Image (cartoon, grey):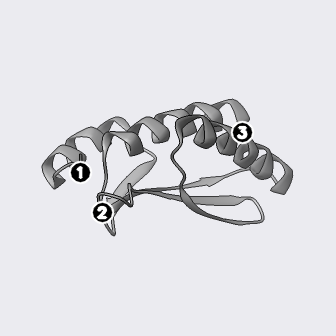
């Protein structure tokens, strides 16, 4: 179920690395080098498969940009926040 803006704005307060814009929750993570960034991406990819939910993301050298929304409902859902939480845990370990 698509969440309304007020709900998203409240939930995102628990995710200081994330912002809500362009109908998605978005984050940018910087690592020490490409290898560390790619390692985190690989771990995130396994989590995405486990959850059956996949991000729009891009990587340039040591920076990973992630955008989460649920395409079949056209907005942000609890699935996006669940994946963001898992991504946060993975990135924390890498840092």
| Residue 43 tag number | 3
State which mark lies toward you, 3 or 1.
1
Of the residues under marks 3 and 2, which one precedes in the sequence? 3
Q: Is residue 55 left or right of residue 39?
A: left
Disc 3 versus disc 2: nearer the observer: 2
Q: Are marks 1 and 2 in contact (CB under 8 Å)?
A: yes
Residue at x 35%, y 59% (from the top left corner): 72
Marks 3 and 2, how far apart in space?
Answer: 26 Å
What's the residue at 71%, 49% (across, down)? 41
**x 78%, y 51%: residue:** 38
Toward which corner of the image does residue 87 lie, by quadrant? Answer: top right
Which quadrant holds residue 11?
A: top left
Nearest the viewer among 57 and 93 is 57
What secondary structure is found at the residue carrying circle 3? helix
Which of the two discs, 1 and 2, labels the residue nearer the N terminus? 1
Answer with left or right where residue 25 lies relative to residue 92: left
Seen from the viewer's position, the closer of residues 53 and 27 is 53
Give residue 2's mark. Answer: 1
Res 74 label: 2
């Amino acid at each position: 179920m698509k969440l309304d803006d007020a709900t998203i704005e409240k939930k995102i307060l628990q995710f200081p690395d994330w912002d809500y814009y362009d109908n998605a929750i978005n984050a940018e993570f910087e690592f020490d080098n490409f290898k560390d960034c790619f390692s985190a991406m690989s771990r995130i990819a396994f989590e995405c498969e486990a959850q059956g939910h996949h991000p729009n993301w891009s990587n340039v050298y040591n920076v990973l940009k992630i955008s989460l929304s649920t395409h079949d409902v056209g907005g942000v859902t609890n699935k996006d926040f669940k994946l963001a939480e898992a991504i946060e845990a993975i990135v924390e370990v890498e840092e």
